[in-house]
Amino acid sequence: MEALPPQSKHLTTKPLQRANPPEISVENPIVYSGEGQEAMLVCIVHGESQPEVLWHKDTMQIDQTERHVIENRGARHTLIIRKVHPQDFGNYSCIADNQLGKTRKTVTLTGKPKTAVFRSVPNSQWKDKYNISWIVDSHSPIEEYKLYYRQVDGDTLQTHDGIFIDNRKTHTTYLGDNMLDYNRKISSYDSYAYNTGYHNLHHKWSKTDWRDIVLPAFPYSHHYTQGMSYLIRGLEPDQQYEARVQSRNRYGWSDFSESFLFTTSNTDTEIRDLGVTHYSSSRASVIFTSEVRSMLAALLLDIACRLVSF
């Protein structure tokens, strides 16, 4: 057998490398801000040859100005918007372009609230009531909340991910003394009445139907972290319920919160009655429903009658 030439022993084949267009990732696909605040939109760009990076709002290219500051530090490209105006909210594109191609990613700047987070304990002290509470971050005052809840059956959570995905009936109620003409905004998929804080017991619905209540956030809070507490009545003893909530400020509704599960007790624990509590990060104010005020008035009248009888 002939020996291979010495140079052939070390012969290697180098794989062909395919050049690709720039790659972009965004630090935060949604950036929350408010009027007069500063917003920072960031994209990370990688490319085999140095790409040119531009920012667009819709179809308009953004140039460096006193309010729009464009910074490039290595692969990190930042658009800083100072003293945000309402017209600044919208979709922004980070576009990277080199001789190998063009890539873009979208970042949304919004003034809407962030997604609310539930803060109440999952186990109720009552068999037919539950005091639910949540907080939400918003650069603008929250104007109202929409609370959804339903009883959970054996397979509800596994088969239905969204509020309306199962096409069940939804019942909407507006709560609060400052109605602000809420009657004209009532939207429901079935006739539904609300009277002094209780659901209309003459209406028949499935136990697992979604029910929702709109809660005005009054007085408005100008703190970044805001919240609400509400006493849900008319529940079944020793049952599990699912809840979600949305928040609305002047720029629109937030996304739905994550599902929150709570359970009613099989016995009652005596505790003072609660109404609707609206609170922020530094102060709290309690807004009692007309039902609670009526109960207090009746109690005072009873005491007065007892005093007169002596």
Image: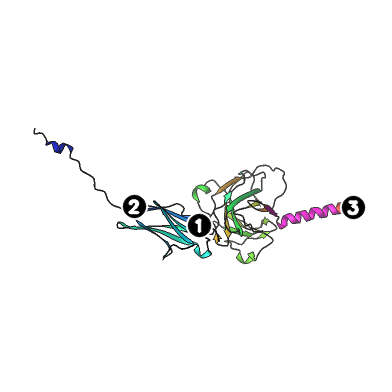
Q: Which residues are magenta?
A: 284-304
Going by the numbered disc 3, the residue's amino acid type is Ser
Q: Mark number for residue 309? A: 3
Count the numbered circles shown.
3
Residue 181's place in the image compared with 17, above or below, is below
Q: Residue at x 74, y 56 (%)?
A: 293
Front residue of 121/142: it is: 142
Q: Mark number for residue 23? A: none
Measured from the top left, where is residue 266 in percent x and y?
66, 42
Q: CA distance from mark 3 to mark 2?
A: 90 Å
Q: Is residue 48 magenta?
A: no
Measured from the top left, where is residue 111 in percent x and y?
53, 59
Res 127 → quadrant: top right
Q: Secondary structure at mark 3?
A: helix
Q: Mark number for residue 39? A: 1
Asked if residue 206 shows in the view, the reply is no
Q: Secondary structure at mark 1?
A: strand
